[in-house]
Image (cartoon, grey):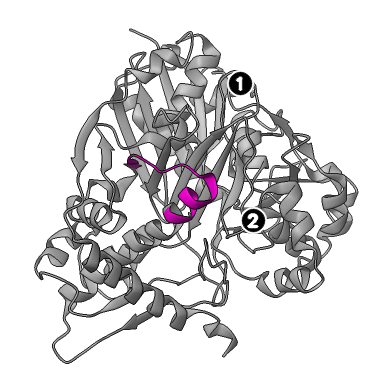
Protein backbone atom coordinates (compact mmCIF):
# COMPACT_ATOMS: atom_id res chain seq x y z
CA UNK A 1 0.00 0.00 0.00
CA UNK A 2 1.03 3.61 -0.56
CA UNK A 3 1.86 5.47 2.66
CA UNK A 4 -1.03 7.24 4.36
CA UNK A 5 -1.19 10.35 6.48
CA UNK A 6 -3.62 10.36 9.40
CA UNK A 7 -5.09 13.75 10.30
CA UNK A 8 -6.66 14.09 13.73
CA UNK A 9 -9.10 17.02 13.54
CA UNK A 10 -10.33 17.80 17.04
CA UNK A 11 -13.15 20.34 16.77
CA UNK A 12 -15.49 22.16 19.11
CA UNK A 13 -18.47 19.84 18.67
CA UNK A 14 -16.89 16.68 17.24
CA UNK A 15 -13.65 14.79 16.77
CA UNK A 16 -12.76 13.63 13.30
CA UNK A 17 -10.05 11.50 11.76
CA UNK A 18 -9.27 11.55 8.04
CA UNK A 19 -6.84 9.36 6.16
CA UNK A 20 -5.08 10.94 3.17
CA UNK A 21 -2.92 9.38 0.49
CA UNK A 22 0.31 10.79 -0.93
CA UNK A 23 -1.65 12.80 -3.51
CA UNK A 24 -3.56 14.61 -0.77
CA UNK A 25 -6.76 12.71 -1.52
CA UNK A 26 -9.13 11.56 1.20
CA UNK A 27 -9.16 7.78 1.60
CA UNK A 28 -11.57 7.48 4.54
CA UNK A 29 -13.08 9.60 7.30
CA UNK A 30 -14.74 9.04 10.66
CA UNK A 31 -16.40 11.53 12.99
CA UNK A 32 -17.93 11.45 16.46
CA UNK A 33 -19.72 14.17 18.40
CA UNK A 34 -19.19 14.68 22.13
CA UNK A 35 -21.24 16.53 24.78
CA UNK A 36 -21.24 20.30 25.17
CA UNK A 37 -21.47 21.41 28.79
CA UNK A 38 -23.09 24.68 29.90
CA UNK A 39 -22.80 24.84 33.71
CA UNK A 40 -23.83 28.52 33.88
CA UNK A 41 -24.98 31.17 31.41
CA UNK A 42 -21.96 32.19 29.33
CA UNK A 43 -19.89 29.20 30.48
CA UNK A 44 -18.91 26.47 28.02
CA UNK A 45 -16.95 23.37 29.00
CA UNK A 46 -15.85 20.02 27.59
CA UNK A 47 -14.91 16.81 29.34
CA UNK A 48 -11.24 16.27 28.32
CA UNK A 49 -11.62 12.50 28.52
CA UNK A 50 -14.63 12.66 26.20
CA UNK A 51 -12.49 14.59 23.73
CA UNK A 52 -9.73 11.99 23.94
CA UNK A 53 -12.07 9.00 23.76
CA UNK A 54 -13.87 10.40 20.70
CA UNK A 55 -10.62 11.26 18.93
CA UNK A 56 -9.08 7.86 19.60
CA UNK A 57 -12.26 6.07 18.52
CA UNK A 58 -12.34 7.91 15.19
CA UNK A 59 -8.65 7.23 14.55
CA UNK A 60 -9.15 3.52 15.00
CA UNK A 61 -12.39 3.52 13.02
CA UNK A 62 -10.91 5.33 10.02
CA UNK A 63 -8.16 2.71 9.72
CA UNK A 64 -10.80 -0.02 9.79
CA UNK A 65 -12.87 1.75 7.13
CA UNK A 66 -9.84 2.02 4.87
CA UNK A 67 -8.81 -1.56 5.61
CA UNK A 68 -5.43 -0.09 6.49
CA UNK A 69 -2.96 -1.19 9.10
CA UNK A 70 -0.85 1.01 11.30
CA UNK A 71 2.17 -0.01 9.20
CA UNK A 72 0.58 1.89 6.33
CA UNK A 73 0.83 5.17 8.26
CA UNK A 74 3.67 7.50 7.40
CA UNK A 75 2.82 10.12 10.03
CA UNK A 76 0.08 11.79 12.06
CA UNK A 77 -0.95 15.43 11.83
CA UNK A 78 -3.01 17.16 14.51
CA UNK A 79 -5.28 20.14 14.19
CA UNK A 80 -7.54 21.41 16.93
CA UNK A 81 -10.01 23.89 18.32
CA UNK A 82 -7.83 26.72 19.56
CA UNK A 83 -7.77 28.58 22.91
CA UNK A 84 -9.68 25.84 24.77
CA UNK A 85 -7.79 25.44 28.04
CA UNK A 86 -7.13 22.55 30.38
CA UNK A 87 -4.87 21.42 33.21
CA UNK A 88 -3.96 17.85 34.06
CA UNK A 89 -1.79 15.95 36.51
CA UNK A 90 1.65 15.11 35.18
CA UNK A 91 1.83 11.93 37.26
CA UNK A 92 -1.49 10.43 36.18
CA UNK A 93 -2.61 12.39 33.10
CA UNK A 94 -5.90 13.00 34.89
CA UNK A 95 -7.59 16.38 34.20
CA UNK A 96 -8.14 18.48 37.31
CA UNK A 97 -11.13 20.31 35.81
CA UNK A 98 -13.18 20.33 32.65
CA UNK A 99 -11.66 22.02 29.62
CA UNK A 100 -12.79 25.65 29.41
CA UNK A 101 -13.85 26.18 25.80
CA UNK A 102 -12.83 29.11 23.62
CA UNK A 103 -16.45 30.29 23.57
CA UNK A 104 -16.54 30.62 27.37
CA UNK A 105 -17.18 34.12 28.77
CA UNK A 106 -16.56 33.65 32.50
CA UNK A 107 -13.50 35.89 32.55
CA UNK A 108 -15.23 38.88 30.94
CA UNK A 109 -15.12 40.98 34.13
CA UNK A 110 -11.41 40.33 34.61
CA UNK A 111 -10.74 41.31 30.99
CA UNK A 112 -12.62 44.56 31.52
CA UNK A 113 -10.40 45.28 34.52
CA UNK A 114 -7.32 44.85 32.33
CA UNK A 115 -8.72 47.34 29.85
CA UNK A 116 -9.66 49.78 32.61
CA UNK A 117 -6.11 49.59 33.94
CA UNK A 118 -4.76 50.49 30.50
CA UNK A 119 -3.01 47.16 30.01
CA UNK A 120 -4.60 46.04 26.76
CA UNK A 121 -2.32 48.08 24.52
CA UNK A 122 0.80 46.40 25.89
CA UNK A 123 -0.81 42.98 25.61
CA UNK A 124 -1.80 43.65 22.02
CA UNK A 125 1.67 44.88 21.08
CA UNK A 126 3.30 41.69 22.34
CA UNK A 127 0.70 39.12 21.33
CA UNK A 128 -1.33 40.63 18.49
CA UNK A 129 -4.43 39.77 20.54
CA UNK A 130 -6.91 41.62 22.74
CA UNK A 131 -7.81 41.36 26.41
CA UNK A 132 -10.79 39.09 25.80
CA UNK A 133 -12.13 35.91 27.47
CA UNK A 134 -11.65 34.14 24.13
CA UNK A 135 -7.96 33.52 24.72
CA UNK A 136 -6.34 30.91 26.94
CA UNK A 137 -4.46 32.93 29.56
CA UNK A 138 -7.49 34.34 31.34
CA UNK A 139 -9.08 30.88 31.42
CA UNK A 140 -5.89 29.38 32.86
CA UNK A 141 -5.73 32.15 35.45
CA UNK A 142 -9.34 31.41 36.40
CA UNK A 143 -8.50 27.74 36.92
CA UNK A 144 -5.54 28.59 39.11
CA UNK A 145 -7.60 31.02 41.17
CA UNK A 146 -10.86 29.12 41.50
CA UNK A 147 -10.16 25.40 41.62
CA UNK A 148 -9.28 24.33 45.17
CA UNK A 149 -5.58 23.71 45.67
CA UNK A 150 -4.73 24.01 42.00
CA UNK A 151 -2.31 26.94 42.21
CA UNK A 152 -0.17 25.30 44.88
CA UNK A 153 0.05 22.10 42.85
CA UNK A 154 0.79 24.03 39.65
CA UNK A 155 3.61 26.00 41.26
CA UNK A 156 5.05 22.74 42.59
CA UNK A 157 5.33 21.44 39.02
CA UNK A 158 2.66 18.78 39.46
CA UNK A 159 0.33 20.07 36.72
CA UNK A 160 0.57 20.62 32.99
CA UNK A 161 -1.31 23.26 30.99
CA UNK A 162 -2.26 22.79 27.41
CA UNK A 163 -4.56 23.69 24.62
CA UNK A 164 -6.17 20.71 22.90
CA UNK A 165 -3.15 19.95 20.74
CA UNK A 166 -0.97 19.55 23.83
CA UNK A 167 -3.57 17.32 25.47
CA UNK A 168 -3.72 15.02 22.44
CA UNK A 169 0.07 14.89 22.11
CA UNK A 170 0.37 14.02 25.80
CA UNK A 171 -2.20 11.23 25.51
CA UNK A 172 -0.83 9.87 22.25
CA UNK A 173 2.73 9.74 23.57
CA UNK A 174 1.77 8.30 26.96
CA UNK A 175 2.84 11.48 28.76
CA UNK A 176 6.30 11.56 27.24
CA UNK A 177 5.80 14.81 25.34
CA UNK A 178 4.43 18.12 26.64
CA UNK A 179 4.46 20.23 23.48
CA UNK A 180 2.56 22.79 21.46
CA UNK A 181 3.21 24.54 18.16
CA UNK A 182 3.64 28.22 17.33
CA UNK A 183 0.10 28.64 15.99
CA UNK A 184 -1.58 27.38 19.15
CA UNK A 185 0.91 29.18 21.39
CA UNK A 186 0.10 32.43 19.61
CA UNK A 187 -3.53 32.16 20.77
CA UNK A 188 -2.82 32.02 24.50
CA UNK A 189 -2.03 35.69 25.33
CA UNK A 190 1.28 34.37 26.69
CA UNK A 191 3.30 34.12 23.46
CA UNK A 192 5.42 37.01 22.20
CA UNK A 193 5.08 37.23 18.42
CA UNK A 194 8.37 39.05 18.06
CA UNK A 195 10.56 36.75 20.16
CA UNK A 196 8.69 33.58 19.25
CA UNK A 197 8.68 32.44 22.88
CA UNK A 198 6.63 32.55 26.06
CA UNK A 199 6.74 36.06 27.51
CA UNK A 200 7.86 36.44 31.13
CA UNK A 201 6.06 39.75 31.66
CA UNK A 202 2.78 38.28 30.46
CA UNK A 203 3.22 35.22 32.66
CA UNK A 204 3.64 37.57 35.62
CA UNK A 205 0.65 39.67 34.59
CA UNK A 206 -1.62 36.62 34.48
CA UNK A 207 0.07 34.94 37.48
CA UNK A 208 0.96 31.84 35.45
CA UNK A 209 3.83 29.68 36.78
CA UNK A 210 6.16 28.93 33.83
CA UNK A 211 6.55 25.29 34.88
CA UNK A 212 3.03 24.44 33.63
CA UNK A 213 3.77 25.48 30.03
CA UNK A 214 4.53 23.15 27.12
CA UNK A 215 7.58 23.56 24.92
CA UNK A 216 6.93 25.30 21.61
CA UNK A 217 7.88 23.81 18.24
CA UNK A 218 7.36 24.76 14.60
CA UNK A 219 4.19 23.36 13.05
CA UNK A 220 5.93 20.96 10.67
CA UNK A 221 8.39 18.68 12.45
CA UNK A 222 8.71 16.05 15.15
CA UNK A 223 6.28 16.00 18.08
CA UNK A 224 7.24 12.55 19.32
CA UNK A 225 5.54 9.27 18.49
CA UNK A 226 2.51 7.41 19.71
CA UNK A 227 2.90 4.64 22.26
CA UNK A 228 2.29 1.18 20.85
CA UNK A 229 -1.07 0.48 22.50
CA UNK A 230 -2.72 3.50 20.86
CA UNK A 231 -2.80 2.15 17.29
CA UNK A 232 -0.71 -1.00 17.48
CA UNK A 233 2.81 0.22 16.78
CA UNK A 234 4.41 3.65 17.28
CA UNK A 235 3.60 6.30 14.66
CA UNK A 236 5.46 9.64 14.43
CA UNK A 237 3.49 12.85 15.02
CA UNK A 238 4.93 15.25 12.45
CA UNK A 239 2.53 18.16 12.09
CA UNK A 240 0.49 20.33 14.49
CA UNK A 241 -1.50 23.51 13.88
CA UNK A 242 -4.53 25.27 15.26
CA UNK A 243 -7.57 24.68 13.11
CA UNK A 244 -7.67 28.05 11.34
CA UNK A 245 -3.99 28.15 10.51
CA UNK A 246 -4.25 24.54 9.32
CA UNK A 247 -7.14 25.55 7.06
CA UNK A 248 -5.12 28.46 5.65
CA UNK A 249 -2.35 25.98 4.82
CA UNK A 250 -4.80 23.44 3.42
CA UNK A 251 -6.29 26.13 1.18
CA UNK A 252 -2.83 26.67 -0.31
CA UNK A 253 -2.88 30.30 0.83
CA UNK A 254 0.90 30.30 1.02
CA UNK A 255 1.50 33.80 -0.34
CA UNK A 256 0.89 37.22 1.24
CA UNK A 257 -2.47 38.63 0.20
CA UNK A 258 -4.26 35.28 -0.06
CA UNK A 259 -7.24 34.78 2.26
CA UNK A 260 -9.70 32.14 3.34
CA UNK A 261 -12.78 31.89 5.54
CA UNK A 262 -13.71 28.71 7.38
CA UNK A 263 -17.35 28.11 8.28
CA UNK A 264 -17.41 25.90 11.35
CA UNK A 265 -18.86 26.36 14.81
CA UNK A 266 -17.66 29.91 14.35
CA UNK A 267 -16.16 31.52 11.27
CA UNK A 268 -12.56 32.60 10.94
CA UNK A 269 -11.16 34.70 8.14
CA UNK A 270 -7.37 34.77 7.75
CA UNK A 271 -5.29 36.90 5.41
CA UNK A 272 -1.71 35.75 4.92
CA UNK A 273 0.73 38.63 5.49
CA UNK A 274 3.90 36.54 5.09
CA UNK A 275 6.90 37.52 7.22
CA UNK A 276 5.32 40.90 8.02
CA UNK A 277 3.64 40.96 11.42
CA UNK A 278 0.36 42.89 10.97
CA UNK A 279 -1.04 45.43 13.43
CA UNK A 280 -4.72 46.27 13.75
CA UNK A 281 -6.46 49.22 15.33
CA UNK A 282 -9.96 47.98 14.54
CA UNK A 283 -10.44 44.68 16.32
CA UNK A 284 -8.63 42.27 14.04
CA UNK A 285 -5.92 39.97 15.40
CA UNK A 286 -2.34 39.21 14.46
CA UNK A 287 -1.56 35.53 14.66
CA UNK A 288 1.26 33.14 13.81
CA UNK A 289 0.78 30.93 10.76
CA UNK A 290 1.92 27.40 10.09
CA UNK A 291 4.96 27.27 7.85
CA UNK A 292 6.82 24.32 6.38
CA UNK A 293 10.30 25.82 6.51
CA UNK A 294 10.50 26.78 10.18
CA UNK A 295 10.42 30.50 9.38
CA UNK A 296 8.08 32.98 11.05
CA UNK A 297 4.81 33.64 9.28
CA UNK A 298 1.86 35.84 10.20
CA UNK A 299 -1.76 36.46 9.34
CA UNK A 300 -4.43 39.02 10.01
CA UNK A 301 -7.47 37.29 11.49
CA UNK A 302 -11.11 38.08 12.04
CA UNK A 303 -12.61 35.73 14.63
CA UNK A 304 -16.39 35.25 14.61
CA UNK A 305 -17.71 33.21 17.50
CA UNK A 306 -21.07 31.93 16.28
CA UNK A 307 -21.96 30.90 12.73
CA UNK A 308 -22.42 27.15 12.32
CA UNK A 309 -23.51 26.87 15.94
CA UNK A 310 -26.36 29.26 15.08
CA UNK A 311 -27.63 26.60 12.68
CA UNK A 312 -27.28 24.02 15.45
CA UNK A 313 -29.37 26.33 17.64
CA UNK A 314 -32.14 26.38 15.03
CA UNK A 315 -31.99 22.58 15.04
CA UNK A 316 -31.53 21.74 18.70
CA UNK A 317 -33.19 24.56 20.65
CA UNK A 318 -35.87 25.85 18.26
CA UNK A 319 -36.56 22.62 16.39
CA UNK A 320 -36.99 24.43 13.07
CA UNK A 321 -34.89 21.85 11.19
CA UNK A 322 -34.09 18.18 11.75
CA UNK A 323 -30.51 18.35 10.47
CA UNK A 324 -28.13 21.21 9.82
CA UNK A 325 -28.29 20.64 6.06
CA UNK A 326 -32.04 21.29 6.10
CA UNK A 327 -31.48 25.00 6.59
CA UNK A 328 -30.72 25.57 2.91
CA UNK A 329 -34.13 24.37 1.74
CA UNK A 330 -35.94 26.17 4.58
CA UNK A 331 -34.16 29.45 3.88
CA UNK A 332 -34.78 29.07 0.14
CA UNK A 333 -38.51 28.67 0.77
CA UNK A 334 -38.77 32.47 1.04
CA UNK A 335 -37.37 35.08 -1.38
CA UNK A 336 -35.83 37.15 1.43
CA UNK A 337 -35.83 37.43 5.22
CA UNK A 338 -38.98 39.52 5.27
CA UNK A 339 -37.32 42.23 7.33
CA UNK A 340 -36.12 39.80 10.02
CA UNK A 341 -32.59 40.22 11.37
CA UNK A 342 -30.79 37.67 13.54
CA UNK A 343 -27.67 38.56 15.52
CA UNK A 344 -26.31 35.24 16.86
CA UNK A 345 -24.32 36.73 19.75
CA UNK A 346 -24.92 33.70 21.95
CA UNK A 347 -21.44 33.91 23.49
CA UNK A 348 -20.84 37.60 22.89
CA UNK A 349 -19.42 39.08 19.71
CA UNK A 350 -15.89 38.67 18.42
CA UNK A 351 -14.29 40.74 15.66
CA UNK A 352 -14.62 43.59 15.17
CA UNK A 353 -16.75 44.38 18.25
CA UNK A 354 -15.16 42.19 20.96
CA UNK A 355 -18.09 42.54 23.31
CA UNK A 356 -18.46 39.55 25.66
CA UNK A 357 -21.68 41.06 27.04
CA UNK A 358 -23.49 41.14 23.68
CA UNK A 359 -26.37 38.67 23.41
CA UNK A 360 -28.35 37.12 20.60
CA UNK A 361 -31.30 39.00 19.17
CA UNK A 362 -34.07 38.49 16.61
CA UNK A 363 -35.41 41.78 15.30
CA UNK A 364 -38.00 42.86 12.77
CA UNK A 365 -40.59 40.18 13.54
CA UNK A 366 -44.13 40.65 12.29
CA UNK A 367 -47.21 38.46 12.38
CA UNK A 368 -46.22 37.18 8.95
CA UNK A 369 -42.69 36.13 9.99
CA UNK A 370 -42.12 32.40 9.74
CA UNK A 371 -39.49 29.74 10.14
CA UNK A 372 -38.16 30.37 6.62
CA UNK A 373 -37.55 34.04 7.37
CA UNK A 374 -35.65 33.23 10.57
CA UNK A 375 -33.60 30.59 8.74
CA UNK A 376 -32.71 32.96 5.92
CA UNK A 377 -31.88 35.76 8.36
CA UNK A 378 -29.55 33.34 10.15
CA UNK A 379 -27.68 32.59 6.92
CA UNK A 380 -27.50 36.31 6.19
CA UNK A 381 -26.09 36.90 9.68
CA UNK A 382 -23.32 34.38 9.03
CA UNK A 383 -22.40 36.14 5.79
CA UNK A 384 -22.71 39.64 7.21
CA UNK A 385 -20.32 38.89 10.05
CA UNK A 386 -17.78 37.70 7.50
CA UNK A 387 -18.30 40.87 5.47
CA UNK A 388 -17.49 43.00 8.51
CA UNK A 389 -14.09 41.38 9.04
CA UNK A 390 -13.14 41.15 5.35
CA UNK A 391 -13.88 44.85 4.92
CA UNK A 392 -11.56 45.65 7.82
CA UNK A 393 -8.87 43.34 6.48
CA UNK A 394 -8.82 45.16 3.18
CA UNK A 395 -8.71 48.52 4.91
CA UNK A 396 -5.90 47.64 7.31
CA UNK A 397 -3.79 45.61 4.91
CA UNK A 398 -4.20 47.99 2.00
CA UNK A 399 -4.88 45.01 -0.25
CA UNK A 400 -8.14 44.53 -2.14
CA UNK A 401 -8.98 40.83 -2.19
CA UNK A 402 -9.67 39.39 -5.60
CA UNK A 403 -11.66 36.50 -4.15
CA UNK A 404 -12.45 34.73 -0.89
CA UNK A 405 -11.59 31.05 -0.60
CA UNK A 406 -14.04 29.19 1.62
CA UNK A 407 -14.11 25.87 3.43
CA UNK A 408 -15.69 24.11 6.37
CA UNK A 409 -18.98 22.27 6.65
CA UNK A 410 -21.31 25.19 5.88
CA UNK A 411 -19.42 26.05 2.70
CA UNK A 412 -21.36 23.17 1.11
CA UNK A 413 -24.50 25.31 1.44
CA UNK A 414 -24.85 26.88 -2.01
CA UNK A 415 -27.43 29.40 -0.87
CA UNK A 416 -25.15 30.63 1.92
CA UNK A 417 -22.22 30.92 -0.49
CA UNK A 418 -24.32 32.95 -2.94
CA UNK A 419 -25.51 35.20 -0.11
CA UNK A 420 -21.88 35.61 0.93
CA UNK A 421 -20.79 36.63 -2.57
CA UNK A 422 -23.75 39.01 -2.90
CA UNK A 423 -23.13 40.77 0.42
CA UNK A 424 -19.35 40.81 0.05
CA UNK A 425 -19.44 42.01 -3.54
CA UNK A 426 -16.60 39.65 -4.42
CA UNK A 427 -16.35 36.14 -5.85
CA UNK A 428 -16.50 33.31 -3.35
CA UNK A 429 -14.51 30.24 -4.39
CA UNK A 430 -15.08 26.79 -2.92
CA UNK A 431 -12.45 24.11 -3.53
CA UNK A 432 -13.29 20.55 -4.47
CA UNK A 433 -12.18 19.41 -1.03
CA UNK A 434 -13.60 21.55 1.79
CA UNK A 435 -12.17 19.75 4.83
CA UNK A 436 -9.08 21.87 4.50
CA UNK A 437 -8.40 21.97 8.24
CA UNK A 438 -7.60 18.26 8.31
CA UNK A 439 -5.88 18.53 4.94
CA UNK A 440 -3.58 21.26 6.26
CA UNK A 441 -2.57 19.06 9.18
CA UNK A 442 -1.84 16.21 6.77
CA UNK A 443 0.22 18.53 4.56
CA UNK A 444 2.31 19.72 7.52
CA UNK A 445 2.94 16.16 8.68
CA UNK A 446 3.66 14.90 5.17
CA UNK A 447 6.18 17.64 4.45
CA UNK A 448 8.09 16.86 7.66
CA UNK A 449 7.94 13.12 6.92
CA UNK A 450 9.28 13.51 3.40
CA UNK A 451 6.06 12.70 1.54
CA UNK A 452 6.45 15.96 -0.39
CA UNK A 453 9.61 17.92 -1.01
CA UNK A 454 8.09 21.41 -0.82
CA UNK A 455 4.84 23.36 -0.78
CA UNK A 456 5.13 23.80 -4.54
CA UNK A 457 3.93 20.21 -4.92
CA UNK A 458 0.82 21.04 -2.90
CA UNK A 459 -0.35 23.98 -4.98
CA UNK A 460 -1.49 21.71 -7.79
CA UNK A 461 -3.77 19.75 -5.46
CA UNK A 462 -6.03 22.79 -4.88
CA UNK A 463 -8.87 22.74 -7.43
CA UNK A 464 -12.07 24.76 -7.76
CA UNK A 465 -15.42 23.11 -7.18
CA UNK A 466 -17.69 26.15 -7.49
CA UNK A 467 -17.32 29.88 -7.98
CA UNK A 468 -20.10 32.20 -6.75
CA UNK A 469 -20.25 35.60 -8.41
CA UNK A 470 -22.03 38.54 -6.74
CA UNK A 471 -25.45 39.25 -8.24
CA UNK A 472 -26.89 41.78 -5.80
CA UNK A 473 -27.13 45.47 -6.66
CA UNK A 474 -24.89 47.86 -4.76
CA UNK A 475 -27.91 49.70 -3.32
CA UNK A 476 -29.46 46.51 -1.96
CA UNK A 477 -26.12 45.42 -0.53
CA UNK A 478 -25.67 48.77 1.21
CA UNK A 479 -29.20 48.64 2.64
CA UNK A 480 -28.70 45.17 4.08
CA UNK A 481 -25.35 46.14 5.57
CA UNK A 482 -26.93 49.17 7.23
CA UNK A 483 -29.81 47.12 8.65
CA UNK A 484 -27.25 44.67 10.02
CA UNK A 485 -25.29 47.48 11.64
CA UNK A 486 -28.43 48.70 13.42
CA UNK A 487 -29.27 45.19 14.57
CA UNK A 488 -25.78 44.63 15.98
CA UNK A 489 -25.98 47.91 17.91
CA UNK A 490 -29.04 46.60 19.72
CA UNK A 491 -27.27 43.41 20.79
CA UNK A 492 -24.22 45.12 22.27
CA UNK A 493 -23.72 45.39 26.06
CA UNK A 494 -26.99 43.52 26.68
CA UNK A 495 -25.74 41.45 29.63
CA UNK A 496 -24.86 44.71 31.41
CA UNK A 497 -28.41 46.08 31.15
Residue 393: say if magenta.
Answer: yes
Q: Secondary structure at mark 2?
A: loop
Q: Which residue occupies the foreground of this view, 391 or 377?
A: 391
Q: Total of numbered circles in the picture?
A: 2
Does 362 sit left or right of 398 as displayed? Answer: left
The quarter of the picture where residue 92 lies is top right
Residue drawn at 63 percent across, 34 percent down: 276
Q: Determine whether 292 is above or below 350 in the image.
A: above
* Secondary structure beneath label 1: loop
Instruction: State the residue position of label 1.
Output: 225
Q: How far apart are labels 1 and 2 at the CA level?
A: 28 Å
Residue 226 is situated, as x and y percent measured from the top left of the image, at 58, 24
Residue 58 at least partly seen? no
- Mark 2 Cα-neighbour bin, 10 Å: few <14, some 14–19, many ≥20: many
Residue 335, quarter of the rendered image: bottom left
Q: Is residue 436 above or below residue 452?
A: below
For residue 316, side relative to residue 268 (left or right) = left
Q: Position of residue 240 (x, y in %)?
A: 56, 31
Which segment did they paint magenta? 391-406
| Residue 417 visible at all | yes
Residue at left 49%, top 52%? 395
List the residue tagged with mark 2: 135
User: For residue 165, what is the image quadrant?
Assistant: top right
The spot of residue 442 in percent (x, y) is 45, 25
Q: Position of residue 336 (x, y in %)?
A: 15, 71
Depth check, front residue: 99 or 332? 332
Which numbered disc flags the more N-terminal residue, 1 or 2?
A: 2
* Structural crowding at the residue carrying mark 1, measured as other residues with C-alpha within 10 Å and reported as few (<14), some (14–19) or many (≥20): many
Is 287 inside the magenta-drawn segment? Answer: no
- Mark in front: 1 vs 2: 2
Which residue is located at x 70 percent, y 75 percent? 109
Question: Which mark is on residue 143?
Answer: none
Amino acid sequence: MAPYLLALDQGTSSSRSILFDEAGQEVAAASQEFPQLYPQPGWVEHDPEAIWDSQLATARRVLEKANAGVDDLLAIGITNQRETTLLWERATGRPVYNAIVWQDRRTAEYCESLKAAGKELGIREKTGLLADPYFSATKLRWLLENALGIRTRAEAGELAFGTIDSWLIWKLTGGKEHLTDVTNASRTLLYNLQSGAWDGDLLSEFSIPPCVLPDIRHSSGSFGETIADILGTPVPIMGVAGDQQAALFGQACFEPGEAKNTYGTGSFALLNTGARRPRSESGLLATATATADGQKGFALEGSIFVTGSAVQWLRDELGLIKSASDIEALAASVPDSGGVSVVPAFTGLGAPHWDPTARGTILGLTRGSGAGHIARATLEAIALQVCDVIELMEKESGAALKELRVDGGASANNLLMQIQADLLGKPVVRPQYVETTALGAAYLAGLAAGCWASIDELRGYWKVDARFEPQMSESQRAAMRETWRRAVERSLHWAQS
